[in-house]
Amino acid sequence: MAKDPSKTEKATPRRRQKAKEEGQVLKSQDIPISASLLVVFLFLLFYIPFAYKKLYEYFSYIFAHPLDLMISKNHLTLMDTIKVMSQLILPPFLALFLVGFISNVAQFGFLFTFKPLTPKLDKLNPVSGLQKLISLKTLFELFKNLLKLVAATIVAYYLVKTLLSDVFRFSFTDVNQDGYILIKYSLIMILGFAILSIPVSVIDFFFRKYEYEENLKMSKHEVKEEQKLYEGNPQIKSAIRKKQREMSLSRMMAEVAKADVVITNPTHYAVALKYEREKMHAPKVVAKGKDKLALRIKEIAKENRVFIEENPPLARSLYQNCEVGDFIPENLYQAIAKILAKIYKRKNH
């Protein structure tokens, strides 16, 4: 359990992923047991007739062909025995393996790690070992085992009580009927344990879930440190963004010197345009600014002898409808074309 009172925050996705990589997963050992008991019952219910038929055929053959038991043919008999026993033993073992695998994967998904096997020195600490003896987990395990014992006692009592009446009749019944009775009560016993194990496994699962969540809880400081580690320190991120803005602004100002025209609203807006007939289908916005930045764009334009056109409505429209790198919209083609024509005319003179 999370003994530190400062750990009040739910685990973050990264904390959960790290715990899973270390082998700390939400897992109830009783769920696979309940599932196995139910599967064994259902499997045997349909499997026993098949197994009975196989064994009957095998022993009928052996007793009908006693010469096959001769030393010279022992290897053939052995191979037949191995074949029959494989057909009888492998299916139930395979069924148990699959149900165990599926019931575990359903709880925590696929996981392959050796980290839980790594020796930890804190496990050798006698103080922590003593604390575990009186922990909530130990008390729960005691309660759960007592519950299992009570369930097993109830099933065994009623089973034995019912079975005793049939046992005394074994001397008056044939072998087949005796076998049927034993198989019937064995199946009833397995089903009884399976049914009674379901509530135990449900209780165990929710306790494990509670325990798992408590162990993963984090303090507010740990959450902040994780955010800094994975998302970056806010101050560093702010400094990076500031540096990026400065570099972007520097690149934009460098493009002003290469522009063909800067269209301005005398004091508020400035938009620099560039047009290369062979490469562009329309003029492109290479820089734009408002207020102080607009004044700076105008200064750079004057320093580099870039044509400045004062046209407040056009400057405002370009600033509001275009971003740096955009081509001007079609509805402004005619207005910009007149300005560019004026510029080319002056250059030719």
Image (cartoon, helix red, strand yellow):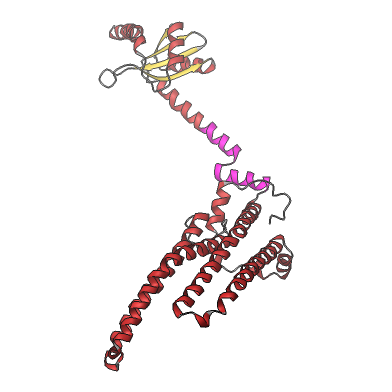
Left or right, residue 136 beside residue 26: right
Q: Quadrant of residue 176?
A: bottom left
Of 200 and 21, nearer the camera is 200
Vertical side of 152 occupied by 296: above or below = above
Left or right, residue 211 beside residue 248: right
Vertical side of 45 occupied by 215: above or below = above
Residue 110, how many percent across, how many down? 47, 57
User: Magenta stretch containing residue 34, yes or no?
Assistant: no
Residue 116, how many percent across, how many down? 56, 64
Q: Quadrant of residue 277?
A: top left
Q: Quadrant of the C terminus?
A: top left
Q: Quadrant of the N terminus?
A: bottom right
Q: Quadrant of residue 55?
A: bottom left
Q: Residue at x 26, y 92 (%)?
A: 72
Q: Residue at x 34, y 79 (%)?
A: 58
Of 82 and 140, nearer the camera is 82
Residue 319, how many percent across, how many down? 45, 15
Residue range (magenta): 219-243
Q: Main secondary structure of the magenta part?
A: helix
Residue 125, how many percent across, how many down? 69, 69
Q: Residue at x 52, y 83 (%)?
A: 171
Of 13 and 313, nearer the camera is 13
Of 47 and 77, nearer the camera is 47
